[in-house]
Image (tube, grey):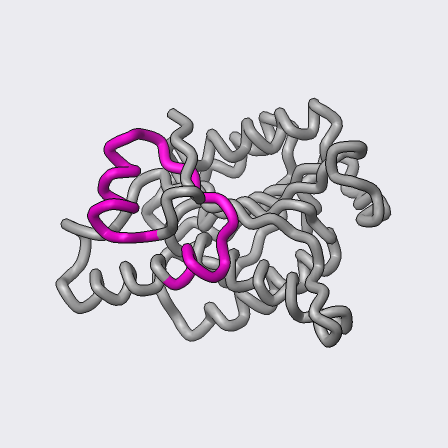
Amino acid sequence: MRKTGRVSGKVRPATSEAPLQSRPLRIVSILGRMNVGGPAQLVAWMTAGLNDLGHDAYLVTGTVPAGEVDMLDAAYAAGVEPIVIPELSRELTPKDTIVVWKLYRELCRLEPDVVHTHTAKAGAVGRLAAWLYRWGHWRTVIGTPRTCHVIHTFHGHIFHSYFGPLKTRLFIGIERFLGRWMTDRIIVLSQQQLEEIHHLFRVGRADQFDVIP
């Protein structure tokens, strides 16, 4: 059964004309897969907590490959019904074009104020979909994109010790591009991450970063 990210399964009509500070926010979190580990549980709890505060928070995720434990139950236990995109997986594949399109369609349906991506793969396809959502609208003809703030959280990084030199350079280049052109805020979990991701690998601008342990 296709879920909507909310227990009620309903999407409230958007009220984008109201100032963000005067109304509940609509927030879409995108995570690559709900496998065993901190990010899955954290994003599930965060989505539930935002809903408890009166916001409209949704969780979009992919599928867990064979051999990994599926943590979707953690989301349901937190009161969150994820939107699952089956083609969203860890590896880069030609199906990623389908993933970007489906994410874009979900964003058009949900009309978020904030898109918050987590982990490398979901961060790439999610931020690209958010950019398309911002700019793929008739209003952009007159230079007025949709209002949507894009946040990416690094729960770690793959800039060394994971892949060969060529693949690593490719991923660093992608993150630099995404950080410069498709991201408003970047969250890291420690000062060490900030030093590595921004100062060592030159991802993003200093004023984009927040350290939230």
Q: Which picture quadrant has residue 189?
A: top left
Image quadrant occupied by the C terminus: top left
The answer to whether 101 is drawn above or below residue 106 in the figure is: below
In percent of width and height, residue 141 lies at 73, 76
**Span highlighted in magenta in the image:** 177-203
The answer to whether 180 is drawn above or below residue 37 in the figure is: below
Residue 209 shown in magenta: no
- Identify the residue shown where x is 61% and y is 64%: 102
In percent of width and height, residue 80 lies at 64, 34
The answer to whether 7 is drawn above or below residue 177 in the figure is: above
In percent of width and height, residue 97 lies at 50, 72
In percent of width and height, residue 7 lies at 73, 34
Q: Is 187 or 202 nearer to us in this picture?
A: 202
Q: Which picture quadrant has residue 173?
A: bottom left
Q: Residue 14: in sight, yes or no? A: no
The answer to whether 83 is drawn above or below residue 211 in the figure is: below
